[in-house]
Amino acid sequence: MPRFEQSVYDITLPVEDVYSSGQLVHAIAPNDIVTINANGKATLCTSANIPFGVVVDRIPESSVAAIRVLGVAECIAGGSITAGNTVGANDDGKAVAVTSGPAFGIALNSATAGQVVKVLMTGVFVIPSV
């Protein structure tokens, strides 16, 4: 039986943590789903954003992270996901099953909130509402 190597594509980008009223709300961390803001920085993706990738690693005490944009990425589930579901982001940058709106891949395993879900990143697409 042939053996298939997993192909991935990671890029390094500056990140922008989430602040509210000058207080840190969320530091971008591994497994976060991110989008690109107007300043060209990766920031936490919400359900209204187009997902760009998943943080693989963040250089400690810096504003730079490795972001997976193609291949299989490990995300944290923000709710129940079944293998085969189309995956997007919730407002906390966690993976959720979506039937409309922005999506970026297909779940390879089932998971519940807080568990790791592996996502085959197929590229960004928008599922139309019907």
Image: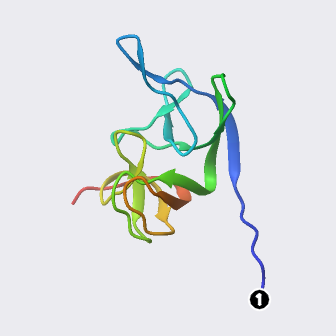
Query: Residue pushed farthest left?
Result: 130
In the image, what residue occupies the spot 51% across and 42% down? 32
Left or right, 56 with respect to 128, comes to right
In the image, what residue occupies the spot 51% across and 52% down? 75
Task: Residue 50: name its quadrant.
Answer: top left
Assign the N terminus to one quadrant of the image. bottom right
Question: Which one is in front, 95 or 129?
Answer: 95
Q: Is residue 113 above or below residue 1?
A: above
In the image, what residue occupies the spot 70% across and 50% down? 9
Left or right, 69 with respect to 5, comes to left
Query: Residue pushed farthest bottom?
Result: 1
Assign the C terminus to one quadrant of the image. bottom left
| Label 1: few (<14), some (14–19) or many (≥20) C-alpha neighbours in 10 Å | few
> How far from the left and from the top, in percent, is residue 51?
47, 44
Question: Which one is in front, 94 or 125?
Answer: 94
Q: Is residue 84 above or below residue 34?
A: below
Q: Secondary structure at mark 1?
A: loop
> How far from the left and from the top, in percent, is residue 31?
54, 46
In the image, what residue occupies the spot 51% across and 68% down? 108
Specify how the rendered protein is coloured: rainbow
How many marks are shown on the rendered structure?
1
User: Which residue in the protein does label 1 denote?
Assistant: 1
Task: Residue 128: name its quadrant.
Answer: bottom left
Query: Residue pushed farthest front?
Result: 114
Q: Hey, what amino acid is under mark 1?
A: Met
> How far from the left and from the top, in percent, is residue 109?
49, 69
> How far from the left and from the top, in percent, is residue 90?
35, 45
